[in-house]
Image: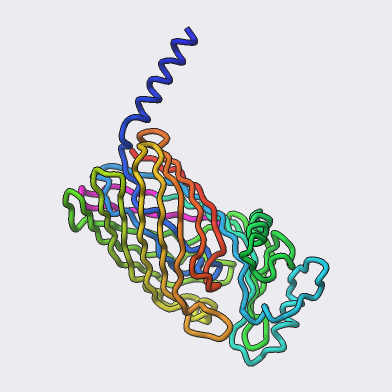
Amino acid sequence: MKIRTLALLLTVGSGLMAEEPLHEMGPFPTREMFPMYLTPMAYQPADPLPLGKGHWRWGLHWVEANTFQFSDLFTKESPRDPTGRIAVTRGTFASTVAAYPQIPTLYYFDEEIARFEVEGRYGLWDQTDVWFRLPVQNHTGGFLDPLIENFHKLGFEQYGRDRVLQNQVTLAVARNGKVTFFSDERILGKPQDPVLGLTHRLLQTATWTLSGTASFKLPITHTYDAYQSGWDQSYGFTGAWRNDGRHAFYFGASYLRRPHGSEAYDEIGYRDGVGAHATWEYRRWRTVQPFLQLYWQSGYLQPQPYQEFDRSSLQHDVGIHWHWTRRTTLTFHYMNNITHRGNTADMALGASLTAHF
C-alpha cells in the first residue's frame, strides 16, 4: 500500500514538473536598499503582463542588504587602533568631522537592513491591473559582514571593513563639521510607506507586450524616525519580448517625481530621477528558470564634495525562479553593484514566495 501511494505521488509530482508553468513571473521587483534611498520612492520594475480580470497574485519578498559606505574623506584617516577593531561612536565621528567645517556634508553608514514586503496584484479588467506593496524593515548589524570580509580577501578590498566591529549599526551625518544625525540603535518591525500602482497594457502581439505604469507612495511613516518624504510618484512603461524558444526578455523605465516632504527630508535635497531595467530569463527547463537583471538609476542628490550621490548607478540582480507548483513560485536572488560609486548598498540576498489565484 505504501509503495502504491509513493508511486502515485511521484507520478503526480513528475506530471506537474513536466507541465509548462501556468504563470510568468516577469521582471523581478528589485529595489535599492542604500540607507539614503529608503525614504524616497525608488525605481522598481513592474510586470507588463496583466493577470486577467478577477485574478490575484500575492507575493512575500525578503531581502537582506548590507551597507558599509562613507565619505571619501575617511579613507585618508588612519585607524585609531591598528591592532584591533574600532566601534564607531558619536564621539569618534564628531571628533573627525570637526576638523573639516568647510565640507558641506559628511556621512558614515554601517548597517544591515532586512526588508519584508507583501505585494498584492489584482486584475481589474483584462488589460488593467492594480497593485500595492506593504513593506516592513529591520535595521540591525545583521550577519553578512564576515561573509563579505572573506570575499574581499580574494582581492576586492574595501577600505575599513576589517578595522571596525562586525555587525555594528552606525548611521551618522555631519554638516559643516557638526553632527546633525547619529543612530546606533537597532530598529525592528518598522513599517515603511505603502506604494499603490496601476499597470495598463498598451500593445500585445504574438511576441511583444508593452504596458504603461503609474504609482505613488503614501507619506505616512518616518524613516529612522526623522525623515518623511512627500507624495512621491512614478510614471513609465514596461515591456517584454517572448517566443516559444529558450529566452525571454523584459525591459522598462520610469520617471520618479520626489516633491518636498518634512523639513529634515528637504534638507537632504532629494531630486527627481529616472530608473530602468533590462532582464534576460532562460527557459530551457520548465520548473527552474534562471534570470539576470540589470538595474539602473540616475543620481538622487546635487553634486557635493567627497560623495557621488549625484552619479548614476548600475547593479545586477541574478537569481532563479523555481516553479514549485503550477500556482506557487520560489525565487532566490543575489544583488550587487557594478559601478562601485559608494551610492548603493554593497550587496543583498533575497527570497520570495509568489502565488497566483
| Helix, strand or loop for the magenta stretch, by majority | strand
Could you tell me which quadrant the C terminus lies in? top left
Q: Residue at x 32, y 66 (%)?
A: 253
Looking at the picture, tell me which residue is in the foreground, 251 or 101.
251
Q: State whether residue 173 is above or below residue 235.
A: below
Tell me the quarter of the picture where residue 109 sits: bottom right
Residue 141 in sight: no
Q: State whether residue 119 is above or below residue 65.
A: above
Relative horizontal placement of residue 56, taking residue 188 as reference (left or right): left
Relative horizontal placement of residue 90, taking residue 329 as reference (left or right): right
**The magenta stretch spans residue 133:** yes
Tell me the quarter of the picture where residue 56 sits: top left
Q: Estimate the x, y position of residue 315 in percent, counting from the top left.
A: 46, 64
Looking at the picture, tell me which residue is in the foreground, 302 or 149.
149
Q: Residue at x 48, y 46 (%)?
A: 332
Residue 264 in sight: yes
Q: Estimate the x, y position of residue 290 in percent, counting from the top left.
A: 41, 46
Q: Which residues are magenta?
A: 120-137
**The magenta stretch spans residue 246:** no
